[in-house]
Image: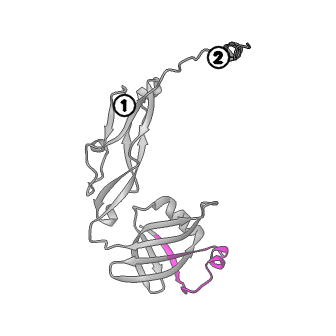
């Protein structure tokens, strides 16, 4: 489990000043706990976020005590993509929960390598259910079975760790092959012929002088 140290935050605190000081405003809530404002180290959070994602448990060591959480929502700056606020969802380590876990594509598709088509990633995450301690960071799926343009990879093909149940329908397509379209050569347009045609038409439409 990952751990982040937190400080209690005054709800009226200047958030811009906190961010300039290397802190990220955050809150944790859930499991009957009131929404608790905290601040966490920006450097520390980004390291944990990169490794834990939103499906691995994170222990928040707050001044009021430690709580087990999941990173529920991260607001990022529209220009810098830096995290500017984080919501942590408190979880019960003894109760199963449902979360969406990202899919990681591995292997090489013979259809793509042979130029038959391009890889289409239909699903980028699937919903699973498990105890918080058993939640995977991601789920790997091998695309090497995509040998022809008719082959598909289904949710049922994903390798699932023990004690984890997939909620997403097993028959849903995760990846497929899109056929490469041949480029059609278009003959260059003769602009001079068009000009001559337009000129002739104008002469035909001109009124006859009496």
Q: CB under 8 Å between callouts 1 and 2?
A: no
Q: Residue at x 38, y 33 (%)?
A: 144
Q: Earlier in the sequence, mark 1 or mark 2?
A: 1
> Front-most of 130 and 32?
32
Quarter the N terminus occupies: bottom left
Q: Which residues are magenta?
A: 3-26
* In the displayed structure image, the side of residue 165 where residue 48 appears, left or right: right
Q: Which residue is mark 1?
A: 146
Instruction: Identify which residue, 111 or 1, lies in the foreground.
Output: 111
Question: Is 21 contained in the magenta span?
Answer: yes
Marker disc for residue 189: 2
Q: In the structure shown, which secondary structural element does the residue marked by tag 2 occupy?
A: loop
Residue 125 - label: none
Tell me the element at label 1: loop
**Residue that appears at 54% across and 63% down:** 47
Q: CA distance from mark 1 to mark 2?
A: 41 Å
Decide: is 162 above or below 200: below
Quarter-wise, where is residue 189 in the image?
top right
On the image, which quarter does residue 46 sit in?
bottom right
Colour convention: one colour
Residue 113, percent across and down? 47, 27
Query: At x 27% / y 43%, what residue is drawn?
Result: 156
Residue 70: quadrant of the picture = bottom left
> Is residue 3 toward the left or the right of residue 198 in the image?
left
**Residue drawn at the location 42% of the way across and 31% of the way down:** 178
Percent position of residue 132, x then y: 33, 66
Q: Is residue 23 left or right of residue 37?
A: right
Q: Is residue 32 above or below residue 201?
A: below
């Amino acid at each position: 489990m990952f751990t982040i140290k937190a400080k209690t935050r005054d709800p009226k605190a200047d958030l811009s000043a906190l961010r300039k000081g290397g802190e990220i405003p955050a809150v944790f809530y859930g499991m009957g706990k009131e929404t608790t404002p905290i601040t966490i180290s920006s450097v520390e959070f980004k390291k944990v976020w990169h490794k834990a994602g939103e499906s691995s448990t994170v222990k928040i060591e707050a001044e009021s005590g430690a709580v087990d959480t999941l990173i529920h929502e991260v607001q990022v700056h529209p220009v810098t993509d830096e995290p500017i606020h984080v919501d942590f969802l408190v979880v019960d380590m003894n109760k199963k929960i449902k979360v969406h876990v990202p899919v990681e594509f591995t292997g090489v598709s013979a259809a793509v390598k042979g130029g038959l088509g391009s890889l289409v990633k239909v699903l980028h995450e699937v919903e699973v259910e498990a105890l918080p301690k058993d939640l995977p960071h991601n789920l790997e799926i091998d695309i090497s079975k995509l040998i022809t343009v008719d082959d598909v990879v289904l949710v049922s093909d994903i390798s699932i760790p023990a004690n984890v149940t997939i909620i997403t329908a097993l028959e849903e397509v995760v990846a497929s092959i899109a056929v490469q379209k041949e480029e059609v050569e278009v003959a260059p347009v003769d602009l001079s012929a068009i000009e001559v045609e337009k000129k002739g038409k104008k002469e035909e439409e001109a009124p006859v002088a009496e």
